Image (tube, rainbow, N blue to C red):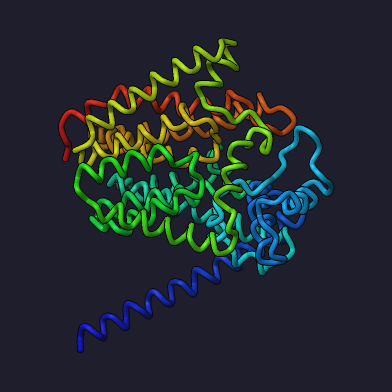
Amino acid sequence: MEYLAQRRRAIWRWGLFMLLLSILLAGQSWITYRVFSSRFPGANDFAARWSNGCALIWSGENPYSDQASLQTQKLIYGRPALPGEDLVAFSYPIYALYFFWPLCCVQPWPLVQAIWMTLMLYGVLAGTLLMMRVNRWKPLPWLLFLTLAWTVFNYPHARAVLLGQMATIVFVAVGLALLALQKEADFWAGVALAAATIKPQVAFLLLFWLLWWSAWQRRWRVWWGFGLALALMGGVGLLLVPTWPADFYRHVLNYDNVAAGPYHSLIWMVVRHTLGLGLTVEVLATSLFVVYLLWEWWRGRRASSEELLWVTGLTLNLTNFISLRVATTAYTLLLLPLFQLFRLGQRRVPKKAAGIIVGVEGFLLLAQWMIFLFTVEDRFETAPVYLLLPIVLLIAQLLTRTQFVAGERP
């Protein structure tokens, strides 16, 4: 009887928490609508997902069709897209729709924008707390609140919220997957990894790494959860749009023409855009990075604890150097290796760590915004904005490698 009473109290507490959270989200969404989105319609990254995806629910239109994209162009531009402009095509797996379909019942767009921006804000905060938990980093209360505030206003994270970027969902999914692995809830870790595939260009190397690692650990429930969730999401998608795999593949092949902007890999930005060197040098540099990452994967195949997190953080960072497309809005994932470094500093120099962390956060906040403001061209970010955080972080990761890889630390 006592057990049942405790269960009922737990259910009531969770119910009350969810009710209060819903009221908070509704109130903040309405304020955001009245103060911001009704006056400054935007969040174009999500508008392309919402308008194209909801066309399936509204009229049965294929989200990948030119007609659906044309309606989205009229929503964003007020006219068809001009040559060189983003065609705002769907360009996502069909199951990305599962993460926002209730918003297809909401009109007008500025209200949808306000709701989604609010959800993404809380997604960034939730992902930040997950990354702290995964790293077992426990900052002092004042530093915790300062870091959460920094997370909201730091350039990549603020941009992700303002654009309504679904990379935030990947951020939360990766945090949940890593936490589930730590708790040995392997099936649910696999499910969370499947959710991260809504933006495969962001998470593809991470998926290879964690599936490779889990195979060496014989933790096959990760594979079961991943495979079952992916088959279920994709299979239901086939019932909705039988041609979606081919449509999605066509959009991926044509992505440079579909999406405007120089969102190539960091190696491309340095080698070809900045140094003016050719394709051969780019391919060679990319190959060296890939070989180095594969070597770390082989060495880390039996990794645990901090070594596992270090290789995972390295994988997330090097994705930006190797991937054919990169976006600053996905840099939220780099909080994993950054917080691991913060915890190392807290462990090695406990009396100075808080000051160092505040200094690093302040530097990144000011430097990234200043680079953007001084280099922006026609409201678009330029190559220098992409480089600071991944390069500085990679140097720090390599310099501290032995602290995590050469023997576990308590």
Q: Can residue 351 be seen at all in this image of the molecule?
A: no
Q: Can residue 64 be seen at all in this image of the molecule?
A: yes
Residue ID at (56%, 10%)? 277
Residue ID at (55%, 58%)? 119
313, 161: nearer the viewer: 313
Residue 20 falls left or right of residue 9 = right
Q: Whole-percent x and y of residue 338?
A: 38, 36
Residue ID at (42%, 55%)? 230
Q: Is residue 345 above or below residue 47?
A: above
Residue ID at (44%, 49%)? 196
Q: Whole-percent x and y of residue 296?
A: 28, 28
Total count of labels: 0
Q: Quadrant of residue 276?
A: top right
Residue 9 falls left or right of residue 105 = left
Q: Quadrant of the N terminus?
A: bottom left
Q: Whole-percent x and y of residue 164?
A: 61, 50
Q: Quadrant of the C terminus?
A: top left
Outermost residue toward the right?
Answer: 79
7, 220: nearer the viewer: 220
Q: Is residue 273 above or below residue 5?
A: above
Outermost residue toward the bottom?
Answer: 1
Q: Quadrant of residue 15?
A: bottom left
Q: Is residue 350 above or below residue 233?
A: above
Q: Whole-percent x and y of residue 232?
A: 44, 61
